[in-house]
Image (spheres, helix red, strand yellow):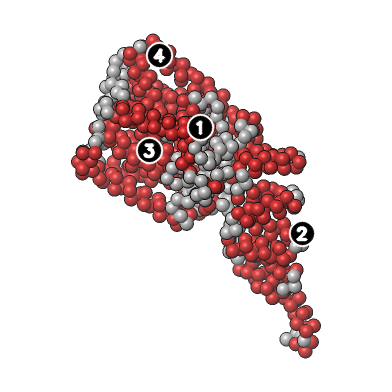
Amino acid sequence: MKHGGSRGVSLPVAAWIAAFTATAAFANTIGNDFAYDDLLIVAGNEAIQSLETLPGTFTEPYWPDGNGRELGLWRPVATWVYGLQWALWNGHPAGFHVVNVLLNGLAAALVVLLLGRFLPVSAALPGGLLFAVHPVHVEAVANVVGMAELLSAVPYLGGCLVAAHCPGRMGAGRLATMAGLFLTAVLVKESAVTLPGAVLLIDAARSGLRPGRLRGYLAERWPVHLVLAAIILLLLAGRLAVLGAVADPHPPLGAEILARGEVPRIWTVLSTWPEVFRLLFLPADLSADYSPGVIPVAYGWTARSLCGLAIGLAVLAVAWWSSRRGPLTPGRPEPAALAFGVLWFVVTMLPASNLFFQTGVLLAERTLFLPSVGLAGGVGWMLARLRWERPRAGTFVTVAVLSLLLCRTISRNPTWRDNTTVFMTLLRDHPESGRAQWVAGDLYFAGGDHARGLAAYRRAIGLLGGGYTLLTEIGRRLVAVGLDRPAEHMLYRAWRERPESGAAPSLLAVLFDRQGRWKSAEEASRAALAAEPGSAVQMHLLARSLAAQGRIGEAIEARREVIRLGENRPRQWHWLAELLRRRDAVRAAADPESAGK
C-alpha cells in the first residue's frame, strides 16, 4: 500500500465518500417526529414560531421556560436557525431532520479533509468513515435539537481547516474568515470555545512544537489567538448580560449534592470515564440518559471511579509516548496521530467534562460528537498501520469494524422516532434511570392512570434523591390533575430546599387559591413575587387572597399593580371596581356622613 494514498483515492474524493456514507447511515431519521428536548425548545416554543418574535430571542436563554437562566445556556444562533426552519418547513419535523442529516454529512467530509492535512488518505478515509457511522452520534443527528452539536461542529472544523491551511502568519482575509467561523460556532453552542486549543494542537501536530519554540510560534500566531480571545470575551459578556452569570448552570438532575460542595465532584466525574470509553469503543448499549442511577453519584472512591482514573492515566501515557515520535506528516501513518487524537478529545471534551465547572449533565452522548474527531484520527491511524503491515487482515478488520458500527447506528435511529418511543426504550433498557421513571410517570398521568403514575414518580424521587426541578415538575402535574395533598407535600419539600426560587411557591399559591386557604395563598404568592417581581399571575393571586381576607386597601393596590404589569383586560377593571365599591361600603358603614364623598 502506498504511503500517501488509498489505491489512488484523492482527498476530495475521500471526503465525498465520507459525506455520502454519513448521509446514508442516518437517512432513516428523516421520518422521526419531535422528541425529548425538541418538545420544549422547538415544538413548544412560541417565540421561535413567528418571524416577528424571533429576533427578540437573541437576548433570551436557550431554554424557553421560566428556568432558562438557571439552566445557564445561551445559544442565539441555534435558536434563530430553529425559528427559520420552523418558517421554512411550516413546523413539520421532516425538514429539521433533513437538515441534521445533511449537516452530519458535511461534518464527516470536513473531518476527512482535516485529518488529511496530517495523515495519508489511507488513514484519513477510514477515520472519516468511522466518524460518519459511529452510533454515539445518533442522539445528535436523530434528535432535532442535536443540531446545536452539528451546526457548531461544522464552523469549528472549518476554522481548524483554515488554521491548518495557513501555518504561518495569517492574512486579514483568512483571519476574518476564522473569526466569523468561531463566532458562529460559539453562538450555536458554547463548547466551541475550545477552538483556540484545537488550533494550538494542530500547529503542534504539524511542526512538533515544543515549549522552547513557543516564543517563535507566538511571534507568528499572536494575531490569530488575539482575535479568538476577543471573541471569547464577547461571548462571556453576552452570557453575563443575558444569563446574569458567565458559567453557573443548573446542576445535573439527581446530582444537586455536587453543586453544594458536600461531596468532591471528582469521584463522580471519574465514574463517567469508563462509560465514555465504552461508548467510543463498544457502543452496543446506548442510552438517552446517564443521570443517577445510570451513573450514580459517588460519595467516595469506588471501583468505577478508580477504573476511570486508570483509563485516564493510560490514555495520557499513550499520548505522551506517541508525541515523542515526531510531528505528523501526510506521507506516512505516524504514531503521533495517537497523541493528536487523544489531545483533541481532551481539549474538546473539557467544557462538558464537569472537571473545572459543573454542567447540566453528568454525561450525554451528544456531547461526544466533536470530541469523537480525535477517535477518528487515532483509530484511522491504527487501521492504516494494520493495512500497511498486513493488507488482508487490515482490510478485513476495517470493513468489519465499520460494518458493525453502521448496523448499530441504523438500528438505533428509530428509537428517537417520538417522545414515547425514546422513553419507553429508555425504561426498557435502563429502568434504573431516574429520568425514565419520571417521564413514565408523566405518560401514565397523561393516560389517566394516576396510581401507576404516582408509583413511577416515587421511584424517580428514590433514584434521583428529589431535587428542586424534579419535585416542582411533579408537583405541577399533581396540581393539574387535582391531587392536592401529594402536590402540597412535593412543593413544600422543594420550597424548603430552595427558598429563593419562585417555581414551588407559585404553584402552591395556585393550589391554595383553589382550596380557599387565603392566608397560605398570600404567603406563597408573596414568596413567588420576591423571586419574580413582574409576575402578573402571582400579583392577581395575591390580590384575591387579600380581598378574601378583608384587606381591601391592600387588595386594591395589588389589583392596580396587576393592571400596571400589562394585564388590563376588562375583567381586571371589573374586579378593581368591585374592590373600590367594597371599600366605599365599609367607609360608609363606619361613617355615614362621609358616604358619597
**Spatial distance from mark 1 to mark 2, Cα to Cα?**
51 Å
Residue corresponding to mark 4: 395
**Spatial distance from mark 3 to mark 2, Cα to Cα?**
55 Å
Residue corresponding to mark 2: 515
Residue corresponding to mark 3: 347
Q: Along the polypeptide, which appears first: circle 1 or circle 4?
A: 1
**Residue at (67% x, 55% y) in the render:** 492
Left-right relation of 115 to 404? left
Dot 4: what SS? helix
Relative to 55, is 205 above or below?
above
Q: Hey, what amino acid is under mark 1? A: Ala
Is mark 3 in CB contact (under 8 Å) with mark 4?
Answer: no
Q: Hey, what amino acid is under mark 2? A: Gln
Residue corresponding to mark 1: 303
Q: Hey, what amino acid is under mark 3? A: Val
Q: Nearer the viewer, mark 1 or mark 2?
A: 1
Q: Along the polypeptide, which appears first: circle 2 or circle 4?
A: 4
Placement of the C terminus among the 4 image quadrants: bottom right
Is mark 1 in CB contact (under 8 Å) with mark 3?
Answer: no
Residue 427 appearing in the image: yes
